[in-house]
Image (cartoon, rainbow, N blue to C red):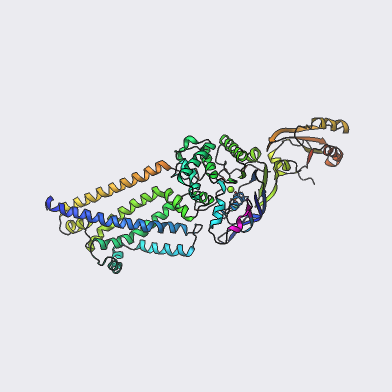
Amino acid sequence: MTWSEMQPLLSQACGDTLYMVGWSTLIAVAGGLPLGLLLVLTDKGGLLQNVVANKVTGQIVNIARSMPFIILMVALMGFTRTITGTTIGREAAIVPLAIGAVPFFARLVETAVREVDGGLVEAVQSMGGNTWTVVRKVLVPESLPSLISSTTTTVVALIGYSAMAGTVGAGGLGDIAIRYGYQRFETDLMWITVAILAVVISLIQFAGDWAARSLHRRGGRSGPAPKLRLLKTKEPTAADVSKVA
Amino acid sequence: MITTTGLTKVYRSRGREVTALDGVDLHVREGEVYGVIGQSGAGKSSLIRCVNLLERPTAGTVTVAGRDLTALAGRGPRAGRELRQARSRIGMVFQHFNLLSSRTVQDNVELPLEILGVSGRERSRKALDLLDLVGLTDKAKSYPAQLSGGQKQRVGIARALAGDPKVLLSDEATSALDPETTRSILQLLRDLNRQLGLTVLLITHEMDVVKSICDSAALMERGRIVESGTVGELLATPGSELAAALFPVGGEATGEDRTVVDVTFHGESSTQPVISQLSRTYNIDISILGAAIDTVGGLQIGRMRIELPGRYEDNVVPIGFLREQGLQIDVLLAEGAE
Ligand SMILES: Nc1ncnc2c1ncn2[C@@H]1O[C@H](COP(=O)(O)OP(=O)(O)O)[C@@H](O)[C@H]1O
Ligand SMILES: [Mg+2]
């Protein structure tokens, strides 16, 4: 296969991958961010404590997370058809990609938001802030560096999953590597695809790390407080209480 | 300004119950600095967190500036609009500052104003005024991570004042700071108390904090207030643990069959002539074990520990004489003695 033969294939594949990953990332963030916040807020001691809702949401997220992507894709075919009108092509692939990525991202959001010092939540409450204020002014901005890292991780994972979406005719770089490289022994094309994937993933990782780090450098920690669970009372650090009597 | 009646807080977790507050009656007058002192676990934080209802009391009432906050709280776990509004008029300062690391110093101070819905321009004017008040004008654009502990606490205080509160709650505000910085922060709180007429309720486990800025104090033990009053009242209370801790005098009895007496005097008067008079009148040798003079809560106070020969029974008359002179007398009984 000559370069002029490969070139249109590759640019089409790049476009397809970008399209699938871009849209599914957008949906994953839009769905996973509130879901992750909800997992934290409804937990015991959270601002919206609701044990039942927390358990149910947690279970759904776990099940969705443990489902292998290829199974998810098949299982969701009916649903995909009702939404996109087809089960084939890149639009159709976005549905299982996004649905797989929402709980994935939600768990990452949950972890990131739990890291936020509970004292900050209390501070905003003591100013008269409500739950929405806490989310907007504390939980999201304070965990932003971690949220950006989580997004990077999600994008990289989605690029991996999108290769499998090739099996429903969605195209993309992974699909080319499998169809031409593996099945038709076009080793050159396969290696070029792998190289492009490696470069793209490195670039995304680099950009994500840079963004997270530049935010972090600016902020840093606000005090020597250990990271506490939401809404936990703090003890004085000096253990030796000067004797009163 | 702050009144709690029968305040009780029981924490329940996994079937275990901890009574952190056990019927606390607290009364903080307008414009005073009130210190609550006690060892770790005594329930001090629970008390102050119940005052603005960050912690929901199990029983009892909290009234701040004439409003019954416990009545505003409603029954659900979430704070309703009225309670949140009341909270915005109560400033709170924390041990670990609790500043948002993602915001500049100025933006941190503006946060309560954002919550109150104050317009952008007014917010920044107010924030800069407050930073000026706490002496941090040049740090407005810095991030908390770039500040020292003392500076962070100043930001914390400026932020607590943003809502024009009448009351400032401070939970161990100086416990994470070194002694030098502690002094300057306490001085700032004292100044704000005087300048703005701010009522300050502060929690601490350090006696020095109470000694340097409090008008009144309470001692907490196992969820109860065991002593309370103005510093003057406490010092005048015979046998007051707080008074003894606020103003300690050393000295051990030199042997058995001795009576040790603490003599406390206020203001300008001196015990010296009284002691020599006592010695002459009753023809007894008096040894002075220790003496100190100090300023506590703005009051000048002296205390002397003296030793009289003989047991307490032998010294009833001389001790009566000292009492008659208007001095505060605490007789220290030997260990094991009745
Ligand atoms: N959120 C909580 N859940 C369970 N127990 C608590 C909680 N907060 C405080 N306690 C318990 O209540 C008691 C008083 O704690 P606290 O008010 O923090 O005391 P202090 O501030 O004087 O050290 C302690 O025994 C503590 O373990
Ligand atoms: Mg405490």
For residue A159, side relative to residue B264 (left or right): left
Q: Is residue B309 placed above or below B53 in the rendered structure? A: above
Residue A27 placement (x, y as % from top left) = 33, 58
Side (left or right) of A158 relative to B271: left
The answer to whether one can see residue B113 in this image is: yes
Q: Quadrant of residue B197?
A: top right
Relative depth, front residue between B139 and B14? B139
The spot of residue B144 in percent (x, y) is 47, 41
Q: Position of residue A164 (x, y in %)?
A: 25, 60
Viewer-proximal residue among B219 and B105: B105
Would you say B263 lies left or right of B70 here? Answer: right
**Magenta range:** B62-73
Please state the horizontal and vertical placement of residue B269, each as a whole percent of the image: 78, 32
State left or right for residue A31 relative to residue B139. left
Q: Is residue B66 magenta?
A: yes
- In magenta stretch: residue B54: no
Count of labels in the image = 0
Can see residue B57?
Answer: no
Which quadrant of the structure image shows residue B303? top right
Question: Which of these two is toward me, A136 or A101?
Answer: A136
Q: Residue at x 66, y 51 (%)?
A: B3
Q: Residue at x 79, y 32 (%)?
A: B271
